[in-house]
Image: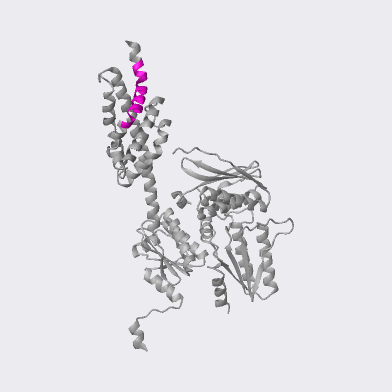
Amino acid sequence: MNLPTPGQPPQVPVLALGDVLLVSLQGELHDGMAEQLQHDITSRIAASRVTGVVIDISGVDIVDSFLGRVLAEIASTARLLAARTVLAGMRPAVAITLVELGLTLPGLVTALDVDRALELLSQRGT
Amino acid sequence: MRVPEQDATGSAPRVVSSFLERRREQIAQRWADAPLFRSVFTVSRDEAVEACKAVVDSLSDVAVSGRLEDITAPGFLPVRDQLGRMTQTRTLSGSTPSQIADEVAGLRVPAVELLREEFPDATAAQAQESVLALTLLLGTLRLVVMETALDANAELIERQRQQLLEVATPVIKLWEGTVAVPLIGTLDSARSQVVMESLLEAIVDQRARYAILDITGVPTVDSLVAQHLMKTVAAARLMGAECIVSGIRPAIAQTIVQLGIDLGTVLTRASLADALAYTLGQQGIEVSRADASASAR
Amino acid sequence: MMRASGQASATSLPIGSDADLAWVRQEVRRCAAQLGFGLVQQTKLVTAASELARNTLVHGGGGRAEITPLDEGRGRGLKMCFVDSGPGIRDLELAMTDGYTSGGGLGLGLSGAKRLVHEFAVDTEPGRGTTVTAVAWVAQVPSSRAGAG
């Protein structure tokens, strides 16, 4: 487990695969890290020719309303910058909990895993 | 005359206790043939005798403590487990708690017969007091057994309810990448939770793109059922699968409209076949008659 | 039913920063797993704890979380209390409404967390603070109450 050092939150690695950004979230995600990630992705899209963003949450145990809001905002911001976002790999327990919580993330495109997400982006991207 | 009489009353439990201790073997031998023990310990009579002895010892302890009518008497503790297992066996073979209680009552006659033999004059006050004390004690045992039987029954019902829940919600692979759950019966909160979990697990296992909830077997759709359906659809969507609700009979479609239930963006089809056809169409799969395609060529 | 009603070892954790929220989540996860909660129920509990602890941090100005394993007649459960001495909630009914928010969230904190547990209570007084108590029971199936929410 990595505790954040004050003033310098650990960053979530953002990988570039051609014109697609791949973000893989793992385990405990502090609020600060999530907000940092939102900022990172937005600036990466603005700086280069990114047409798609895949956020892999298969390694995430829980999504609460805060993380849900961050994910929805990443997608909305990306859309404004002409990139499409796909949320991939949500675990069944997380999906059930989100629905019960009242968070159905209607604006987000979802996929079973990263492969399917990339497939989805390549289908309609061209 | 007063003094010995009072003495006799106070000592009756002790008399019973020492009787139970002394005649432990004989009582156990007689009880082992009683339906309660015989029907549980079918393999070995020795086991039945041992089980009987444990109950006799327990009763003796309760008698010494003087708490003849107290089902929470600590003396019962050592045999509670054993009685629990016995009643469970009887429950599983179809006996009701009251039938089991009757079997316990059947233990009274052989025990009282043995106790009477202890007294040269069976009509003596002490003899009558002792028989009364033993009868009370066995009555309490009957309540203890009844209590464990009711517990075992409740457990059995809960377990069967669980099994029913799981059995009633199979997830079927209809096609590569398409899974379906035919729902039968009432869709309450507990059911819908199980349905949701098994459907989502199946989506992961089968890497399904489409999930069909078939409600042909659901008798009524009220706003609560609709809510459960919509939750399941939403959860499947979060996993990246498209969910279709099929089997909406005309009567149910009418109810949905009349109740003003908004199924929102949920995709619906009249039958399971229609839903499958839709998923195949979406994947660009065409199904046609073999001879038809042959003659077309 | 010879179980002793146990108030076994309550754990108290401070809520003062978002790193503390992570500690609360992990402690709830650990406790829930130990008590025998299934994966879905664990996830619901941890999510509810995350929502409520964030409320304590954001709206209550910090406080503490008390996590208590329960073992009573009706079975095993987990009790979570979130205590702050912040401004309190002026209109509780409004605060419990889906979509209502005074912070930057989605307004699902209280109402959403309530749907994830079996028992839920808010004790609040303006100027004195807020205590939110949530209890969930280990069950094969959730109580039928769940559909009412």
Write the residue at 66% across / 68% down. Answer: A14
Residue extending furthest top?
A: B1
Measuring from the top left, give residue B114's x and y in whole percent.
28, 27
Looking at the picture, does residue B163 appear above or below residue B287? above
- Report the quarter where the N terminus of chain C lies: top left
Measuring from the top left, give residue B294's x and y in whole percent.
35, 86
Measuring from the top left, give residue A1's x and y in whole percent.
65, 56
Looking at the picture, does residue A123 appear above or below residue B258? below
Judge left or right: residue A58 versus residue B233: right
Residue extending furthest bottom?
A: B297
**Quadrant position of residue B100:** top left
Decide if residue B239 is in sight here: yes
**Quadrant position of residue A85:** bottom right
Depth check, front residue: C1 or B171: C1
User: Is residue A8 magenta-colored?
Assistant: no
* Count of labels in the image: 0
Looking at the picture, does residue C125 appear above or below residue B199? above
Measuring from the top left, give residue B222's x and y in whole percent.
40, 57
**Quadrant position of residue B290:** bottom left
Judge left or right: residue C42 versus residue B75: right
**Span colored in magenta:** B7-25
Scheme of image coloration = one colour
Depth check, front residue: B269 or B235: B235
Judge left or right: residue B119 versus residue C130: left
Decide if residue B99 is in sight here: no
Main secondary-structure element of the magenta-colored stretch: helix
Depth check, front residue: B227 or A5: A5
